[in-house]
Amino acid sequence: MNRKTKEIFIKYIFFVFALVAIIVLAMIVFSLFREGLPIFRQVSVKDFLFGMEWYPTYDPPYFGIFPLIVGSFIVTIMATLIAVPLGVLAAIYISEIAPRVIKEILKSVIELLAGLPSVVLGFFGMVVIAPILQNVFDLPTGLNIVNASMILALMAIPTISSISEDALYAVPQEFKEASYALGATKFETIAKVILPAALSGVTTAVMLGMARAIGETMVVLMVAGGAAAIPESIFDSVRPMTASIAAEMGETPYRSLHYHALFATGMVLFFLTLTFNLIADHVSNKFKQTGSATL
Amino acid sequence: MRDSQANIMKWRYFQQSLFFALFRAAALIITLALGGIVIYIIINGISAISWEFITKPPTHSMTKGGIMPAILGTIYLTVGAISIGLPLGVASAIYLTEYAKQGRMIRLIRVGINCLAGVPSVVFGLFGLAFFVILFKFGSSILAGSLTLGFLILPTIIGASEEALKAVPQTFREASLALGVSKWQTIYRIVLPNAMPGILTGSILGIGRAAGETAPIMFTTAAFFTSKLPSSIFDEVMALPYHIYVLATAGTNIEETRPIQYGTVLVLVALVLGINMVAILVRAYMRRNKRW
């Protein structure tokens, strides 16, 4: 084999390796479909997605995951409401205001927060936050939407904050200088120039943070309470899709209807997070941040 | 006139300090949350830690004894995951940074990597169960768990490796190519060695992730309790994260085993944050002592 063919050969080997992420994605879709689709021979797609009753072990069983979908969305939305202000404001502080040393420390703090295992945060929610909520609001249980949302927010903050910070940092220096030259204060520059210029990056950050929250398992499994019903207040328990899968998969017989229903729930979850990720990807590509070259 | 202008200026700076205080408060809340959690776990967990706790298996249906099998299991799984994720991830990153030209295919691969990074951990668990445990007949085993975790950390490793490869100056490659060295040899002899420290520190973050994940190993590896240590990669193992979950939610006496739970949480946090801390410090050190 001469040198040129060898080089081309090597290039194609690496190309195959580069496809590994897509291959794994395909394998995931394949296994979800293979094990999830059989449920739809027994239950219609509409009854599965919009059915209000999730009683998989009753006779006859009910496989309606609507309460689980609602559970997933409500904790995700509430977690986002907490995490977005904290994450974005902290990102502004880190990128625009903080002195260098504090900046480095805060970046490490956020990285370490991202590194905390979810089971540890779930445990913290169970033993610390739950009793506090129970006592302060005089509730039957502290394992509820509020608790889960607070802990999930902690998990989404690192994603939101670090990606927002990158976006803010990437705003060209000229933009800031132009704003200062017009007599704007530093705050006015941040609010009216830097933040709008970084908006697509911040939007991407929020979408990815939400995807993280909706897919998070251990936290909601441990602190959301586990009631498969539509909640009436934010102090009710819910059973998000992830929690339902994790809690029930261990005890269902292999290839039972329940088993297929859990895989089908996994399909719904997969396509939901995929949508969030594709939107994030689209936003960050379509609204590419303006650079100084476009001035 | 002068007065009102001065007032407006005053108001603008007042507004500024008000909002700056808000930004600071947000950063402070996040720091306090992390600090609070870590300190709380250390205070409550430290009394459970002893030599026996780390080196002995659980006894009395997990209400007494240590957590050695879980520590060992987590180490096996993490090593397994990294030996799958690292070669695949680095090879993938080499293509993306060294060979690929901008185009449709590359765009597709990048979207694929981003989407893989966003797949929920419990879906990875389902995938591992359906694919490795059932389809490949590995059973609930170290092998199935390592493969699942290896694919889970793949996007992290690709990202870290790409960044490290891009940081190697273009002039290094040009100098090598100008000497008549082939592209592959340039990558192998020049680019990779220079990028290696960056690849490794970035990958450490992936290791921390693999050690701390629970949902992907619940259906693929983790044993509720095994007294014997694994003898092959087809055996089940206990793992620290799953052990915490089991003790905290399904143990025989949840309140009584609280000290063991705190101890196990402390060991896991020390392990994971320790790994992360090393990565952060090494990276800071390397940035300061960069040769180019």
Image (spheres, coloured by chain):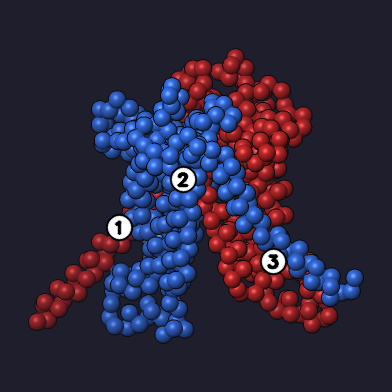
Name above or below for residue A268 compared with residue A21.
Answer: above
Asked whether the viewer can see residue A278, the reply is yes
Residue A268's disc is 2
Give the colour of chain A: blue
The answer to whether dots 1 and 3 both sit on one chain is yes
| Rendered location of residue B13, percent (x, y) | 24, 69
- Real-space Cα separation, disc 2 to disc 3, in angstroms: 33 Å
- Report, in whole angstroms, how far the alpha carbon at label 1 lies from the one at label 3: 44 Å
Colour seen for chain B: red
Q: Residue, x 63% and y 27% (percent of image)? A: B223
Q: Residues within 10 Å of mark 1 (few under 14, many from 20)?
A: some
Proximity of marks 1 and 3: CB atoms separated by less than 8 Å: no
1 and 2 marks in contact (CB < 8 Å): no
Instruction: Tell me the chain of label 3.
Output: B
Residue positioned 57% across, 26% down in the render: A253
Count neighbours of disc 3 (C-alpha within 10 A) and say few if under 14, some if 14 to 19, many if 20 or more.
many
Say what secondary structure mark 3 lies in. Answer: helix
Image quadrant in which the N terminus of chain B is located: bottom left
The circle drawn on residue B22 is 1
Among the two numbered marks 1 and 3 on one chain, the one whose residue lies closer to the N terminus = 1
- Residue B36 in view (yes/no): no
Horizontally, residue A5 falls left or right of residue A212, namely right
Under circle 2, the secondary element is helix
Residue type, label 1 = Leu
Q: Please provide percent x and percent y for residue A19.
A: 66, 60
Label 2 crowd bin: few (<14), some (14–19), many (20+), radius 10 Å: some
Q: Are marks 2 and 3 in contact (CB under 8 Å)?
A: no
Seen from the viewer's position, the closer of residues A70 and A210 is A70
Task: Answer with the quarter of the image where residue A146 lies.
Answer: top left
